Structure formats: C-alpha cells, structure tokens
Amino acid sequence: MDRLQEIRFVLNGKEASYTGSAADRLLDVLREQFRCTGVKCGCREGECGACAVLIDGLLRNSCCVAMGAVEGTSIVTIEGYRETARFAVLDRAFAQLSAVQCGFCTPGMILAAEALLSAHPHPTEEEIREGLSGNLCRCTGYNAIVNAVKSAAEEGEGLW
Amino acid sequence: MVNTSGGYSAFSLQEALELRASQDVIPYAGGTDLMVGKHRDADYLFLSRVPELRQITEDAGYVRIGAAVTFSEALASPLVPQLMKEAVSGIAAPAIRNAGTFGGNLANGSPKADSVLVEVASDAKLRLVSRSGERTMDVDGFCLGRGRTALRSDELIAEVLMPKQSPDCCFYEKVGGRSALAISRVSFAGIFDTQDGRISNIAAAFGAVADTVLRFRQIEAMLIGRTIEEARALRDSYVAAYAEQLVLTRGRVSAEYRRAVCLNLLNAFLSQCGL
Amino acid sequence: MDTISQSVVKKDHGPKISGRSIYVADYPSEGVLCGRLLHSRLARARVLRVVVPELPEGYYYVDARDVPGDNNVNIVLDDMPVFCRDTVEYIGEAIGMLCGPDEKLVERLRDECRVEYEELEPVTDLRAATEAFFSYSYGHGDVDRAFAEADRVYDEEFETGYQEQAYIEPQGMMAEPEEDGRMYVHGSAQCVYYIHNALTRVLGCGPDGVRVYQDVTGGAFGGKEDFPSILGCQVAVAAHSTGKPVRCVLDRREDMECTSKRHPSICRYRAAVKGNRVTALDIDVVFDAGAYSTLSAVVLQRGIIAAPGVYNIPNVRVRGRALKTNTVPCGAYRGFGAPQTFFAVEMLMEHIARDLGLDALAFREANLVRQGDRTSTNGVYHFPVPLPAMIDEIDRACSYRKKRLEYAAEQSGRWRRGIGISLDYHGAGFTGSGERDIIKAVAKLHKYRDGTVEILASNGEIGQGVRTTFPKIVARELGLPLDRVFFCHPDTARVPDSGPTVASRSLMVVGELLRRAAIRLKAEWVNGEEQEVEEHYREPEFQLPFSLDRFEGDAYPTYAWAVTAIELEVDTWTGNAKVLGAYADFDVGTPIDLNVVTGQMEGGLLQGIGYSSVEKMDHDAAGRIRSNSFSDYLIPTAKDVPNLKCMLHVEEYPEGPYGAKGAGELPLVGVPAAYLAAMEQALGGRGLRHVPFTAEDVIGALAKEEG
C-alpha cells in the first residue's frame, strides 16, 4: 500500500518512467515528456480519437487516461507502431487509396485499424466501420479509410 | 526527484478500502468520465489492478460483474446477459468501451449510463464494501440524480449482481444523435416474462430523460398476474398511466421529443411482448 | 481520361501517416510562452475594467494597449479588433491574453481574471437584427409584370443553421520574434498572405517586418481563412510585448464557441410560374454575419449570385443582406454562401413541382440553363452545361426515378423511405473580377542546379492535395519524374503572393499559372544552372467584365456542376434517419489526381450530410453557443454512412490546367436539398423548409400528422 512513487511502464518497447503527478494525462505526458507528437490532441474529452494509443494491445484515448493507470502497462504510439511490418501494410494501403488528407486523425486511425485487425483479421465493412467509429475524420468521408483497411487486411494476410 | 502527488494504486480490495477510508481520494477505474472533468487537486485511487474488482463470476442466483470490469471485457464474457451486452455494445466506441467500467458508469451518477439502465430494468443489485463491512442494495435507488449516489465516502462499489433470468422477451433501444460516439438522448430497456400463462414480470426502464433512470413499479403492477388477454385489454390505460407519469426534463433535446420517443418505445415493447 | 488523372502517392502521405509531421502544437514548448485568451462572457457590454491577478515572474497579460500599430485585423473591412475596444460585441470575443511558461498556471490565472462589465442590450435574434454590414441587390427583366401575368405564385421562406467546420486540429498560431526584429508567425492556416498583411498593420511595420509560414494544417474547410489572421495578430502582439515566442492553441470548446462558422440564413423566395416554367423569382436573402463583418461580403456575394440556382429565369430580383448580431462572427465554410441559397431554390423547385403535380426532376429539367444562356448576373454560361447527362448517370447509378415512384406510395410501419435529388454548381474561383483586380496572383518555379524544381506559391496544403497536384502539373510539363519537383508549405519570406487557399481556386487558377511557368521553364531550360520563372494571372479573354456595384457580368469564368441524390430511411419511433445511399456526379473538369478529387468529393458529400441532419448548433437568447464540444455538436462517424458513391463527369475547361476546374467546394453545396427532399418524401410529402432537419424535427412532423 504505497503512495505512487514512480510510474513505470513500457513505451514503444522501451522501459519508461514518470515522476510527475499520477493525475496527469497520458496524452500530455506522451507529447511533452516523451515527444511522441504523433499522438494528437483534438478534443481532450475522449470524443475524437486523435490521441488514440494502444495500452496492452487495446485501443484507448490517451486524453482519458491518468498516468497512475498506466503503471505496469505497455503502451504503443504511432512512433513505435510505424516500425512494424503491420504498419508497412497499412501504410501501403493508405498510400494507394490516398486515405490521408489533413493527417491529423491519421495516427489514431492507424492504431484503431491495428486494434480492429488484431481482433478481426478478415473484417467485414461493418466491422471496419465499427472499429473506426471512435475516430473522427472530417476530410475523407471515411470511404478511402475503410477501403484502405479492407485492402490492408487482404494484403497483410497472415500478419494479423 | 520523486513526485508523490496525484494518486494511489491499490493491488487488493483490502488495500483499496484502507486508502478509501483514510484518504481523500476519488476512485478511478476507467477514467473516461473523470478525465473529462477538472479534478485538479484530487488524488485518484487507481482500482484497475484490484483483482477482486476485475472478475465476472456467477452463483446460483446472480451473474456478478466486478466494478472495474470494462465494457469490452463484459462483451467477451459468456456469463453476461444478452440484454446487457446489447446495451454496452452501443456505448461510444471501442476505445471508450476498452476503458469504461460498470462501477464507473454507476458512480458517475448519470441517468444516461447505458449499463445502469439495464441494471435497473433487470432488478440488479450492488454490493458496496467498506473497511467496516458491506451492504447490498438495489441499483434502482443508488443513483440520486445530478451526479449524486448513495455511495458513502468510505465505500467502494464491489460488484453488480445481475439476476439470472431467461425472460420471454427483452427489448432495448438506445436513441443517440448518431450511430457511434453518441450519448443517449433517450434509452429504453424492457423485460417481460410469464409464468403459467400469467405475467410475472414487465419491467420498463427509461434512461436519459430525467435526473435518474426511471422505472414505475406501481404502473407495472397493473399488469402483473394478468393473462395476456387481460393485459391486452388494459394496454391503453397502461400506456396512459406512463404518459401521465413521464414528466421529463429537457437536455440536448426537448422534453416533448423525449416523451414522444419514450411512449413510442414503450408501445413497441408492448407489441413485441404480444400485448 | 488524361494520364495526369492517374493517382500517385501523395507527397505528404509518409510524414503524416507516421506521425512525423509537425503541426503547430507539436513544436517543443521549451522557451515558448503558452497563450490563453480571456474571452467575453457577455454578448454586448462595455468593458469597464479587467482585474488581473498578481502575476508570477515570467507571466504576462496583454490586451489592446499592447498593440503597437492599429488594433484592427485586416480581413475585408477592418472592423474586427485584435483585442476588444471599449465594448465587447459577442460571447467569446478576445479581451486579452494571459501568457506564461506553464499551461495549467496560465489557464488558472486567466480564469482568475475578473472583468467588470456594463451590460448593454444585445441583438442575438437574426429576425430582430437591423444593422446591415453589407446590402446588395441586382436583377434583370420585369419581375412585377411576370408576377402579374403568372398562372401561380409561390411564397416560401427557408432557414439554415450554423455549421461548424469541425477540422480535427483546433486553431493554433505561434509568434516568434527574430533576432533582426522581424516577427515570425506560423501555424494552422489557409492564407499566409492574409495573415501577413494583417500583421503589418497591427504591428505597424512594413512587409519585411513580418514573415508568415503555414505549418502542417489539420483541416480547414474555410475555417482557417480568416481566424488565423485574428489569432496570428493576437500571438504576435503578445510576442512583441513580451519579447518571447508565444503559442496559442485553442481548446475544442473555445474553438467551437469563438471561431467562425457557416452563416445561418433566412431566405424568402417568391416565384411566378406560367405553365411549367418559372418566369420570375423575387428573392430576399438574409445572412447572420455575427458581430463583425469579417468575410461576410464574399459569402453574401456568392450566395446571392447563386440564388436563382441552375435555372434560366427570365425575370429575377435579388436582395441580400448580411446583418449584424451580437454573436460569433461567421466566416467561410466550404461553398460559402451557396449552400444556403441552393438549398432554398432547390426546395422551392421541389415544392412548386409537387403543387403542379409534376415530377420534380422533370420540372427542373424544363427550367435548366444551357450553354450560351445568360447567368443570373447577365454573364454567359460559356461552356457546356452537362446536367441532363449527369442526371441520367445518377439515375443509372441509383435508380432514382424508379425509387422515387416506389417511395411515393403510402408507407406505414417503423421505417419509411425517401429519395431526393438536387442540382447545383460551384462558380469556379474568386467572384467577379477578384482574381484580376484584387488577388493578381503570381507564381514561380525555381530550378536548382541539380535539376530539381521547387514550386513557389502561397497556396497551402490543407488536406486537399496541392502539395501533390501542383508538382504533378509541373513535372508533367517538364517531363520530369514527380520526385524531382517539390512544393513546401508557403513561407511569405520565400514565396510570391499567389493568393489565398480558398474558393476552389488553387488548382484551377494557380495550377494553370504553374503549368504556363513550366512550359516557359522547359523552353529556357539550361542544364546545371539555377533558373527562375514567374507567371502572372491573366483574366481569360472570353470573360465578361464583372461589376460588383451592379452585379453584372461574368461572376465566374466557368462552373463546376453537381447532381446529388440521397436515399434515406426514417425511424418513426426515434426520429433518427439513416442514409441508405449517397450518390453524386460531379463535373470538376479533368481530375488532376483521381484519388485526390474523389477524396474531396466524398469528404464534402459527408459534410453536407452532416449539415443537413445531425450538425445542429445554435445560440440561446443571451447569445451563448452551448453545443461547443464534439459530444454536443455531432459530426458523422464512420458508422453513420454507407460507402458514398461519387462519379466524375468530365467537361474540360480550356483555361484550367489540362481542363481542370475548381473542385473542393462543390460536393457539399447540393446535399441539403437532396437530403431534405428525401426526408420530405419519407414523411409523406409535407413541405419542409429548414436544415438541419433533426430527429426532433421528424418526431415533431409526425406528431402533427397524428394531430
């Protein structure tokens, strides 16, 4: 029964620790202390998904996570995910369909796609739309994104 | 430098209860509601690693859902009743369901909480624990409106007790402004059961339309014990009784809209029950 | 289709998808002051005093007294102050800015500022507003006579609400004093030279005293046309006053409440009809400008020019006013002005057809303009009007005519269906002679010794693809691989003023300048030498001069055309509507990149669906906007729509690069009328006259049916 001293976690595969307040937002800490600026802040209320990260493999909005809750977890942001083979598949699919416009929702969208494909390696369009439903995009109308995820699932057969 | 502000982490229920009793802390499970508000000077009590709060178990009478169980975990559990799954699958979006918990949905004290609606309709109970003991109470009655609940300052919600039942008919409808990431504007859950040709249960709960989830047991009593035929004859006066009782507040949408939709859903429920 | 249409990997794809792109909020905060605006809480009041709490070392409060030059932001007129004058005119107006190193402390200090007001009576209701920032009228023919001779006369009023641009990246600007005394301002923006010009006036310096750079911009849609000039001036004043870099990134609620959005409108249409022809329209357009004039002039101009729609109406009288209210100033948003009037005229045509017992589409077709006809402002439709062919294409794609008949039958049960169609255009480029007289665009190509070519232009990538499409044009003319031509975000210290990134003009106007520049560069090309060519805008020779005083002449050189069909299903229990299909055919000329254009069309179409249905924002009687978050102001999610079906019908425009016309605005414009026509059919043909048409409106309409 200790007061939290130092919050330890794994960030993009590396040991990390935080000594600030346990009530601080993961979003702010990732951006400020760890310079993971691919984690975007669109609303700070869990309503847009731009700050989505994976915590122990699950999609989470980092604006709604206090640092005390990440103790002992493994966090993946776009900065870590972009080094993976799965990212390369999504990257190609998004490139081929020009699914990136302003780019602000994209890192969160990519991690939502990863979470979706982990759960459903062969998703239906409905499953894709459900999987991306917490990530707002104002530019694309979602067609290109949904189609890119569908294409990545096919191209990346066996990866997920 | 080691900063020691901002919160405590508990690794067992006993630890959590000690901290809850001895410190001024805000219990933190999923964080999805807490982190939206500003609790700048608050210490959090982090509960996500308390094993006793993370389980879904069952006994003869109940499915017991730990307070720190997330909505996604409930969706993956074979024990959780279908009606509850229907409700939590409609909450916000995956990232929120991966974080939001049953305890948090209750403690937030909102009439819009989709899991609470089903709990009220299902006659679910809560086990509340503290260092000095525990008590069980009906979910209906726990939320007191405007974010207030019956939780005492030394207590934690331990688990939700969902009665095991396999009713003839269940009905759930969430009315939000869009298909995902939607806060309920009206929500409705109905449970209907008969025994030996007579109505044994006809629960109707209305969410997001007043300070708390609404359920009118005195109106339900009109039909309890009746045959289907008798209930059909009473249907109009039954609906009229609701129409009179549903005094609703306005919020993001008008009270008139809420009332009209509540009655539409009630009628749809009755029709689905064959009344 | 031209090979230039073949899609390529967008130049900004890699940095954006990998999270490496640096948006304004992403620069390190070491040594940078965080700025937080102190906003007015009253819609109209005299500010008597601002009591600022005692500020710790390194914390500052700045306001109008710190403005070194003129406390007016240059937009169209100069009535918007950087920080408020004696009075505040809307809730959210900036009174001052708190700055300091720690964001949380800055916010706390800002919240502790106490403003003493003398409250004044605000005007918040558009119907009670009387002060016009802009008032225009124009017409042709003999309207009164046409009404006197009409078989039937119609009189209807249409209303539209606010629409928030809802770019996912909030507004943000940063100002950094440079060692040579120059002020470097950068951030999320569409128009670097607008900001540049506004800054010289506010800082009281010459053009060399400031430098403006567009950071990677997370969506704009018109919302970052005027506001970055305001915010840019605010941070620049703060940086000037403190001598330190200052950054201000708005939070979402602040952004939704205090920054520009689409003008609410009330349009009254009177129509004279003889046989199946509309012989006269008498139109009164009112836009809610908000508290300052900002961009209302250009929004209103476009709105009233489009007011008669795609129809050849022999007698027209149009009056338009942008009225002042004590509410947030409205500005540009995709389509600016045209969505409001196209909605009105298309619904009017729908209603007249129904009253006449005619098929709504056939009635429209009977009144359509054709190539060579006069425009509403007595200009000429110089080029083919492909609407009839596009209507057939849409009909084939979604069986519009068949479904229209099918859904006209009486419907009962929980779900009711409807399908609606609308026709519209987007006048390509700046209104009137704005390109020739005001913008005077200049674009340059710079060739380096190694043979790579840089595009120097002031148009900003905001997601619409110019960082890719501009280089495609230049690379094609020069016969170079695409990776040898590049286009960075504009920096006013390096690029000429090729005009703002607005009005779907960048590709059509500046893209053509670049194409011409590339042709010249190719002719003059010398290996191993650094070379530069510059091109200046020339108005097309066929264009009839436009008079803004009389609204006469070619308001636009050419038009992009759209046919939009929406099919939906209404839930009579809840009032929610589900879009079953959204189909649109667009003529934007040659697509310079098929994916880019399709992405623009799909995105605009969905914004239009939002505008018509769930995107409801209004203010209360006190002038406060309460739907100021993403949980209250709903924009569509991926789950709210099926795959959108967009088609392209290509009529090449000889003055645009390879035949391209303006594209970005078009897809939104026609959606509200198509959506509401579908809704009207689903609800059994009652006359609906406003958007957004929400679930509450549906339940209200059904209650009337029962009542």
Image (tube, helix red, strand yellow):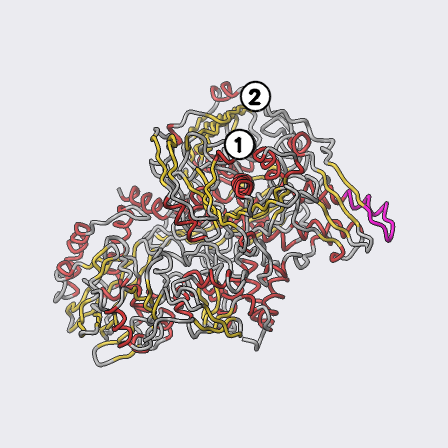
The residue beneath circle 2 is C141
* Left/right of residue C521 with respect to residue C249 in the rendered view: right
User: Is A157 left, or right, of B163 in this rendering?
Assistant: right
Q: Nearer the viewer, mark 1 or mark 2?
A: 1
Query: C280 or C362, which lies in front?
Result: C280
Residue C76: where, in percent of width, then height?
A: 56, 31
User: Chain for mark 1?
Assistant: C
| Residue C72 - label | 1
Which one is in front, C390 or C294? C294
Q: Residues within 10 Å of mark 1 (few under 14, many from 20)?
A: many
| Residue found 50% across the figure and 18% down from its top | C145
Q: Which residues are magenta?
A: C516-531
> Residue C369's spot in the image, x, y percent?
60, 34
Chain assignment, label 2? C
Q: Residue at x 55, y 23 (%)?
A: C139
Q: Nearer the viewer, residue C319 or C300?
A: C300
> Secondary structure beneath disc 1?
loop
Q: Is residue B51 above or below residue B215?
A: below
